[in-house]
Image (cartoon, rainbow, N blue to C red):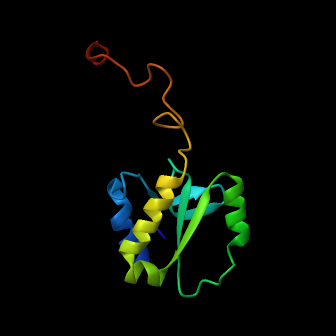
Amino acid sequence: MMRRDPTEPEKRLWRALSGSKLGGYKFRRQAVIGYAVADFLCSQKAVIVEIDGDTHVDGSDIERDCRLNELGYHVIRFGNDDVITNLEGVCARLLAILEAAPDRWHSPHPNPSPEGEGLQTTRDFTE
């Protein structure tokens, strides 16, 4: 449901992040990580971006963030108002965090395909 009906701040930030628009970093939205659902996730840098609404209680996510930190993720939070009124500043801060963060893996993907998988010749399809 959250993916189909995002809040206005989530829509705006997603437009800035989707398609690797922010520094070439790829993001997923509403990414499932264990028991948690992250608003936005950059897997390459293990950075989670959360957008906190008006009804969000400060400190209510401390335990959740600690668990995600234990799994190797860095959680950054922005308020709805920040995204709505200062999207450029939010993006600049997020880009600085991404550029400072180490890559999670050194290969292009953490789970590369087994050798030869997906490599079929045209002849295989015509025989």
What residue lies at 48% left-to-right and 56% top-to-bottom?
98
Examine the image and state in which quarter residue 9 appears. bottom left
Q: Residue furthest bottom?
A: 54
Residue 59 as seen in the image, left or right of residue 1: right
Q: Is residue 11 visible?
A: no
Q: Position of residue 106 (x, y in %)?
A: 52, 35
Q: Is residue 44 visible?
A: yes
Work out whether 82 lies above or below 39.
below
Q: Is residue 111 above or below residue 115?
A: below
Q: Nearer the viewer, residue 74 or 33?
A: 74
> Horizontal and vertical percent for residue 59?
69, 79
Q: Position of residue 56 (x, y in %)?
A: 60, 83
Q: Quadrant of residue 67?
A: bottom right
The answer to whether residue 127 is left or right of residue 99 is left
Q: Is residue 119 left or right of residue 70?
A: left
Q: Quadrant of the C terminus?
A: top left
Q: Position of residue 21 (x, y in %)?
A: 33, 57
* Residue at x-position 65% and y-position 55%: 34
Taking the spot 50% from the left edge, 60% from the top edge, the residue there is: 97
